[in-house]
Amino acid sequence: MMRAQVNPNVKAGEIPVIKFDDVGKLTLMAAAGGFVMCRRPGCYPVIRTMKEWRSLSDKPWCAE
């Protein structure tokens, strides 16, 4: 069995769980190796890079 690699530079709870893009809300499901798995409510999961995830807004576009 393989063990997951732990990045010592990322502390637990450092990655925001909910982000927003121009379509709507995205919820983080998992993060590993510079990628995140996220999904919209009622949709299939998608994979994004950590750079893309961090560049998304923390607030809905209508609140800005």
Image: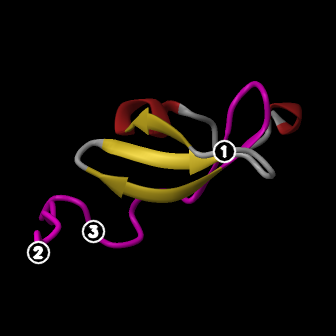
In this rendered view, identify the residue nearer to me: 44 or 19: 44
Magenta stretch contains residue 17: yes
Residue appearing at x 56%, y 59% in the figure: 17
Instruction: Mark 2 vs mark 3: give the one in front.
Output: 2
Name the quarter where the C terminus is drawn: top right
Residues shaded magenta: 1-26
Outermost residue, top side: 22
Instruction: Tell me the residue at 27%/68% (across/down).
Output: 11
Who comes first in sequence, dot 2 or dot 3? 2
Which residue has dot 3 on it?
Answer: 11
Label 2 crowding class (10 Å Cα cut-off): few <14, some 14-19, many 20+? few
Label 1 – label 3 distance at C-alpha: 27 Å
Q: Secondary structure at mark 3?
A: loop
Label for residue 12?
none
Q: Amino acid at mark 3?
A: Lys
Residue at numbered disc 2? 1
Name which quarter of the figure residue 9 lies in. Answer: bottom left
Answer whether labels 2 and 3 touch (C-beta < 8 Å): no
Instruction: Estimate the x, y position of residue 36 in percent, counting from the top left.
Output: 42, 46
User: At 72% across and 46% down in the image, what residue appears?
Assistant: 40
Q: Is residue 56 left or right of residue 51?
A: right
Query: Which of the marked residues, 1 or 2, is nearer the chain's N terminus?
Result: 2
As drawn, 32 above or below 44: below
Q: Residue type at mark 2: give it.
A: Met
**Relative image position of residue 12 (x, y in whole percent):** 33, 73
Residue receiving disc 1:
44
Circle 1 — which element?
A: loop
Q: Quadrant of residue 58?
A: top right
Distance between the Cα atoms at labels 1 and 2?
Answer: 28 Å
Q: Amino acid at mark 1?
A: Tyr
